[in-house]
Image (cartoon, coloured by chain):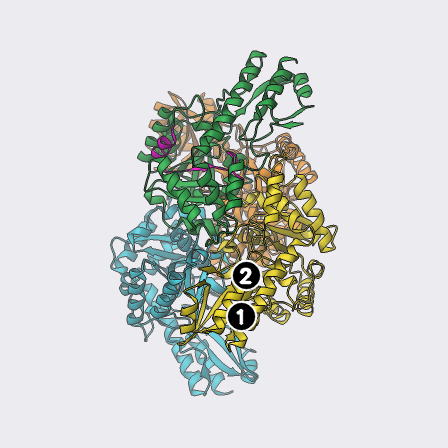
Chain colours: A green, B orange, C cyan, D yellow
């Protein structure tokens, strides 16, 4: 059985493990103020083209999301997000747990538009009873989205300008950011993202690390006392060095992008195979998640040798499923899967 | 200018004020353990046909809603409600403020069905990643709904049974409960409601009192330490007697129902006038809120002498608006409005 | 049995009831934007000598406290208060319910000093692990304190300056503010308080109103969107006019001070009687709460005709108790009590 | 410079790293349902002598503490703890962040007694205004305490029985549990702890792991839906296997105890050296943390070659400091330190 179910089925890229072993006996202070964290921060700032950014390392995505969001919002404010946004559906109400409503916008492909944000904002402030409603306080997007789709540079720019004008900080969840930047369809670099958002994070867990997300705070107004927020929310790792070592390794010799390119290119070969077989695609993804719509009998046959995720029933005879590739996906596994698809 | 904008534009029914004056110098202990509260509780229990119910008096509806909801749910649970439910749209995120998500169901008329609840429940538990999603923990309905509509006895029974089977406490927001029970279209008595919900409240603010909502806890499992919940949420009135006096008066000689009948019957006359004029109705309400769809020029003319609420634009030339009646609405005001409608 | 147990055993000053009756049929908009609220706001601003202050009316003290506090603090901050402060002991964890720690300072008489605040602040920031501790974010005092004691003008000034220098908003809980200002020992006027705090409230519930606290926000930085905070916390009264009417009446012809003076002067007569009888006083109060230390047999005899509050056992044979006077306390009741004390 | 500042200055015991490398390419499902977690759970249950316990793996101590505590308490309840308890002083208000007050008991050595718990409980329920105060809902202790001290079997038994009788779940924070069990002064085994608490955790971060705490829920009433709690609080590691692998390794061939014994025995040699030098000890610790009271000039000399933690100023000329040993502390480093102490 080969697992294509998600992008966190193995440990970590071997260079990371190697680095952890090499440094194992070095003594460092705790809580992220060690030399490895410092070095990783410096490399990330450089990669972002933003020497003044604050960089913090958190353990996981849910934690990063609610820590950032609750750091920004006042008690009566909510965060605008796509209905399908990770914070809205798959974090067990962690954002609400910090007291804030997720204000949802409908979305076909996981993306939201500047026009949608403008409309929600205006509707709020136009309403004479606006004080009886949650005030929009910031905007959350994920890139790539939960559906593997990507914002274009133009789209992100319009969103960012819309947000700026309305004093709504724009937060980009980059749990799979590498796969977005490395995609053949990408029009956004890491520098673009750093200049078109107020705060974002660079996902490690799903892009080669054991765990870890690097939160990059670009907007100076959002920086104050963020370390308190991390500790308050149980996210300050005692051996913070572990996060530093991982991101330092990922941002050395472009490992982060190499890992992502590997996964993306295998995913595109899979996509091509699905298309050549005549399958529809639930979302037109150019990143490491692919969403073919399979005839149910084909799906069952494939399920004997491969594990993948159920996404949704499309009709009585077809099901959308998700295949993920990652740093650890082997070319031969993908080739074998393609062959098996062709033979269905 | 005559105000039909809402049902809380005046003070209180004169019998309430009279009673407050008569008792003004009586010395009582604070916090709702006085003789007036006791008497009101006894009368409410009798009216509900439920001698074992716990009855607590809170000041307002938002407070009653989030206090009840946060008393029932565990941190990772949410409350199922109609998208248009008051807790979802008009309480500035008070429920989320206590850490809980509102799990919304689409609704055309403000009501939700047992089938919808079953589906949401099943979808949750069927999902292999259910622990990553907010767990449905209870159901919230309002009766009458925010659209003036009513649950039938059959509908409420099916909802209640659905909830019982799934261990989901059913909570009925009765901010306008009197107008529902007194409606000519009602198939539910107060006793029915007490036997087909786990907890509900009898609205005073909008039905003749200065303020106050009587929370009735029927399910013994939900009773424990509710007074702590009230105090914890800032809802324990020092001079609790004020709530006791008001509800004691409302539940003496059926004042609560008389007040509601007065408003309902005036609203039905208004409704008839709208219909005879050929206006559509946004919702088919048999309670004190009426939602005619007015041609915009008619709306503007009426707005010169009457104040009413904007509801929504229906098309370029028509607008749905809301007219409310209350205990204080004068017959002559309604007659004059009807005449003005006829003359448009 | 005559009740001296607390200062909220009766209804309201008759002028308030009269005004509520007179205005009962006037139609007003809800939620505190009516003419009575406006008029009351204007009078309070004048009385405070601060034309730019924001004035909001809330229903009760616990609600006012946690709404103000959670409006000011960021998630990882706490509020500095005396160990005996109302928010720390008698609000069922309402402040913690909003996510914030109460950082307590020891206090003999209910007051805290500027030196204590400075020390706590310095200890926090001096500690190398300060991010692991709750950050002091504001200071809460009550005036009069829960023990009936008063800050002098010098003390308040030093506190305020200490707070300003450290960017710690100073919040004064004035649940019994009238009794403080009207005290023969007072060195603080309402204007002084408005110029030596950032936000405070003028208590109505315990000083002649049915209920209600007028929150006065002096510091412009604390004003933004406070109405959202009120609604979010369930404190926005639908018939907000009721609060406006009460405070408008209290701030007409100095009723608020007359009510307080009446109570204070009766309390001072009681105090004198206790002292002449040779009883110790647990706190040296010049306001409407008096705390004599009674021999237990005397206490038991008095308890047959009077109700008062147990405060604490002082030794095996003596108990500190609390007697309160209020707007409603009758001179003859006090005279009779004094006579009974003398005859013990 | 040799660091004795804390017990998390290095990476992890080499056997853990080795195991992580060996398993790096094995594909497993995420979120803690993999074979390594299952194996670790089984070993921990066996070591606890409790086949029915639920075992969950969390990343850090603060996270474990507030997740367990907020899982147990209702909104108006608080957790009883020593004033010096980690949750009260060094978690940036994480417990309050979940809405709950920490109800503190004074403590000289970090321990609390059954008698203190009984008194606080009785005082709460005896008070007629108990609904105005936070209700005690559970008890938190740490073992070893933050001061390195240990509960005896008799003390823990009395605490547990006291808690049981009052329906207060007893929660033991075992961030340094290994060092307690392995101590020469210990009268408690892991089995004892599992039978004398309701829920506890076995600390990994400070006892040889990279990170991780194993929460053991013994009381069936506390087990329900704890995985939702973990996810809701951002504590569910995507690559949960990392926690399983670590605890599986630690509970193979008694590695956990061997690691702890190593640190404890070195600490006892240090303790002896301090005592022989004539230094006082701030706490009489038999575990890996030692708290000598050093003359300030000696302290400064030692600080040139060793790093250790400032604890508190004892008088003008003496300072209490903390030295920690760990799995990674080298015997030669301790011997050198002892020699340097002798030569002072």
Dot 1: element: loop
Compared to residue A169, the image places residue A5 above or below, namely above
Viewer can see residue A1? yes
Name the quadrant containing residue A134. Answer: top left
Front-most of residues D50 and C158: D50
Name the quadrant containing residue C265. Answer: bottom left
Q: Are marks 2 and 1 on the same chain?
A: yes
Which chain is disc 1 placed on?
D
Residue D51: image location, x then y, percent: 75, 51
Residue B24: image location, x then y, percent: 47, 62
- Magenta stretch encompasses residue A196: yes
Front-most of residues C330 and A230: A230
Residue D134 circle label: 2
Q: Quadrant of the N terminus of chain A?
A: top right
Mark 2 or mark 1: which is in front?
1
Residue D106 circle label: 1
Question: Mark 2 packing: few (<14 Cα in 10 Å), some, or many (20+)?
Answer: many
Residue A227: image location, x then y, percent: 42, 50
Q: Which residues are magenta?
A: A189-210
- Magenta stretch encompasses residue D325: no
Q: Is residue A334 left or right of residue C29?
A: right
């Amino acid at each position: 059985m080969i697992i294509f179910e998600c992008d966190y089925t193995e440990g970590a890229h071997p260079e990371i493990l190697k680095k952890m072993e090499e440094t194992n006996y070095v003594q460092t202070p705790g809580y992220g103020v060690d030399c490895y964290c410092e070095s990783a921060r410096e490399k990330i700032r450089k990669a972002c083209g933003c020497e003044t950014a604050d960089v913090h390392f958190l353990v996981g995505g849910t934690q990063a999301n609610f820590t950032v969001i609750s750091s920004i919002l006042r008690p009566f404010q909510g965060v605008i997000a796509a209905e399908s946004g990770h914070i809205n559906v798959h974090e067990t109400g962690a954002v609400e747990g910090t007291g804030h409503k997720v204000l949802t916008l409908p979305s076909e492909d996981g993306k939201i538009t500047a026009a949608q944000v403008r409309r929600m904002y205006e509707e709020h402030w136009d309403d004479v009873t606006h004080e009886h409603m949650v005030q929009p306080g910031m905007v959350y997007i994920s890139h790539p989205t939960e559906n593997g789709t990507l914002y274009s540079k133009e789209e992100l720019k319009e969103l960012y300008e819309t947000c700026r004008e309305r004093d709504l900080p724009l937060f980009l969840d980059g749990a799979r950011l590498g796969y977005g930047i490395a995609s053949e369809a990408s029009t956004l670099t890491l520098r673009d993202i750093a200049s078109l958002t107020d705060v974002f994070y660079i996902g490690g867990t799903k892009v080669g690390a054991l765990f870890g997300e690097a939160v990059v705070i670009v907007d100076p107004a959002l920086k104050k006392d963020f370390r308190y927020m991390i500790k308050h929310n149980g996210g300050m790792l005692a051996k913070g060095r572990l996060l530093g070592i991982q991101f330092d390794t990922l941002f050395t010799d472009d490992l982060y992008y190499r890992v992502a390119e590997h996964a993306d290119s295998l995913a595109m070969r899979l996509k091509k195979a699905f298309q050549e077989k005549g399958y529809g695609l639930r979302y037109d993804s150019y990143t490491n998640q692919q969403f073919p719509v399979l005839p149910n009998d084909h799906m069952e046959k494939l399920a004997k040798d491969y594990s993948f995720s159920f996404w949704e029933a499309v009709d009585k005879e077809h099901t959308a499923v998700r295949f993920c590739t990652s740093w650890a996906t082997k070319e031969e596994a993908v080739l074998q899967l393609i062959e098996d698809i062709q033979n269905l």
